[in-house]
Amino acid sequence: MSGYSVTLHKDKAFQRAMRRAGARMGDLTVPFKEGGAHMLASVAENFRREGRPEKWAPLAPETLAEKQKRKHDKILVRSGGLKSSVTFKALRDALQIGTNKVYGRIQQLGRGRLGRGPRVGRPYLMFQEEDVELVKDALMNYVLGG
């Protein structure tokens, strides 16, 4: 630089903060647990609204007739097994959300056969943009010590 310049250097407080942030990046289990609890609430809302941001495909007439006999009117809810089986696992570097129900994949993707006839995908493991932002914020707050 010609003329005049001012140089700013990282100070000791900044260096300490960056070391703390680096150390916290090694294990993100704590913020992923917070994010997982939020994501479970989001999935429950998906079931309550029967899909979001877009509604799930309507039921086939024979499925609708069966549900009316059993007095169940919600899509993807027969016994509540799928809905209640959704859990999360917070790892050091990832957050996993899913179900151990074999038919969960078929319901999510619509691939395969379950019962009678072809399947229509009804993605219940859908997360809204605000859900993802909340998890990102939890990660940033944790890493930066906020």
Image: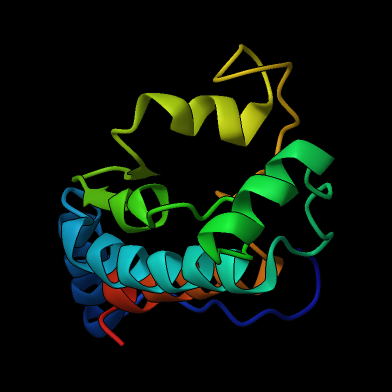
> In the current view of this chain or complex, which residue is farthest to the top?
112
The quarter of the image holding the N terminus is bottom right
Q: Quadrant of residue 92?
A: top left
Q: Looking at the image, which residue is at 78% across and 46% down? A: 59
Position above or below: 92 against 17:
above
- Looking at the image, which is closer to me, 43 or 15? 43
The quarter of the image holding the C terminus is bottom left
Q: Looking at the image, which residue is at 71% across and 24% down? A: 119
* Residue 136 falls left or right of residue 73: left
Whole-percent x and y of residue 133? Answer: 59, 70
Whole-percent x and y of residue 116? Answer: 64, 18
Q: Looking at the image, which residue is at 68% across and 72% down? A: 49
- Looking at the image, which is closer to me, 132 or 103? 103
Position above or below: 102 against 142:
above
* Residue 110 falls left or right of residue 25: right
Position above or below: 7 against 20:
below
